[in-house]
Amino acid sequence: MMTITCITNKTRRFLLWAGMLLVLMLPGRVPDTAAQSLTIYSGRSKALVEPLIRKFEEEHGIRMNVRYGGSTQLAVALLEEGRRTPADVFWAQDAGALGAVHRNGMFEPLPEELLSLLPAQLHNSEGTWIATSGRARVMAYSTSRVDADLLPESIFGLADRRWRGRVGWAPSNGSFQSLLTAMRLLEGDDVILQWLHDMKANNTQGYINNSALLQAVAAGEIDIALTNHYYLFRFRETDPDFPVEQTLFADGDSGNLVNVAGIGMLTTSRNRDAALKFMKFLLEPENQEWVTREVYEYPVLEGISTRSVDTPLSDIQDVSPDLDLDDLSDLNRTLDLLRRAGLL
Ligand SMILES: [Fe+2]
């Protein structure tokens, strides 16, 4: 009896192990790893990002954790957290914020198959972040008080006496400061400091942000405003007769900056698969359409239908001066110049 019991126990144990092994070896029965998740630091607004996040979760079964904030503020948080950051990806509104994280070596080089989806100017030169949409700096002007033929060809022409007291800008606004950083890199700090002084002496009017600038043009307080391209389209949404037009400066002028929103993956991410899937998802045509329709930014891929912006980004880039977008992270010296000119 003893012997038989022993054999039975041994057999049972053997069968148990064999069974477990079999379960592990069968392809369909490999135990599922814990559900994938992805943590995003988003400098893009919740209204824009949340519907896309939900769509991605549904399509890929990846759980998303999002921390919202200003792009610069989140870049600073990432630099402080360093290797302890819980973030897998950083989606920023501004190339300068991405450049700051890149320069601190916190972004992982992205695979060629992702980079090759975009024209070379729409990812940084080391391929650690990709643009997800673009926005152009423009000169907006009153359709009733300005003859478009007389507009200056260069942003430097706005310091001319002809425009005395008629131009508005937003020195404390992030987009304006990025433009100024670009101008500084292209022309040198001294030239830009002089321009700031000249503009101030020409009684250029300061406003809090781009919306306020366009309202001021429409209300007749100023005739020209330095702004981003998409604000006009937003005003036209509620008022198709909004009395403002906009244009770029002449080919190659340093007033023609194309800035981008973009995304990079942290070197410390343990969810690379999910991170890359999300980046690819943002470049899918229908998601590109959504982002650009929602905020009137430019798609980064050709052939995407948008609501009112029909100039492809590549055409605008043709008239923009060449610039490494990572360099826009050099904000401190820009702020210093603005302070020295008494504008901050
Ligand atoms: Fe904006």
Image (cartoon, rainbow, N blue to C red):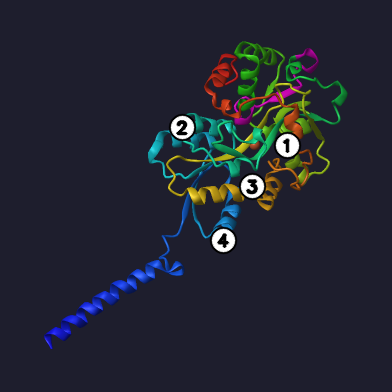
Q: Nearer the viewer, mark 2 or mark 4?
A: 2
Is residue 106 shown left or right of residue 291? left
Residue identified by numbered label 3: 283
Is residue 153 shown left or right of residue 329? right
Instruction: Tell me what residue is drawn at x 55 percent, y 42 percent.
Output: 111
Is residue 21 shown left or right of residue 319? left
Q: Amino acid at mark 2?
A: Gly
- Residue 105: give its label: 2
Does residue 63 sit above or below 138 in this rendering?
below
Measure the C-alpha gap from mark 4 to mark 1: 30 Å
Measure the C-alpha gap from mark 2 to mark 4: 32 Å
Instruction: Tell me what residue is drawn at x 53 percent, y 38 percent.
Output: 70
- Counting residues from the start of the chain, the first of labels 2 and 4 encountered is 4
Residue identified by numbered label 1: 313
The residue lying toward the viewer, choosing from 113 and 241, is 113
The residue lying toward the viewer, choosing from 145 and 263, is 263
Measure the C-alpha gap from mark 3 to mark 1: 15 Å
- Residue 58: give its label: 4
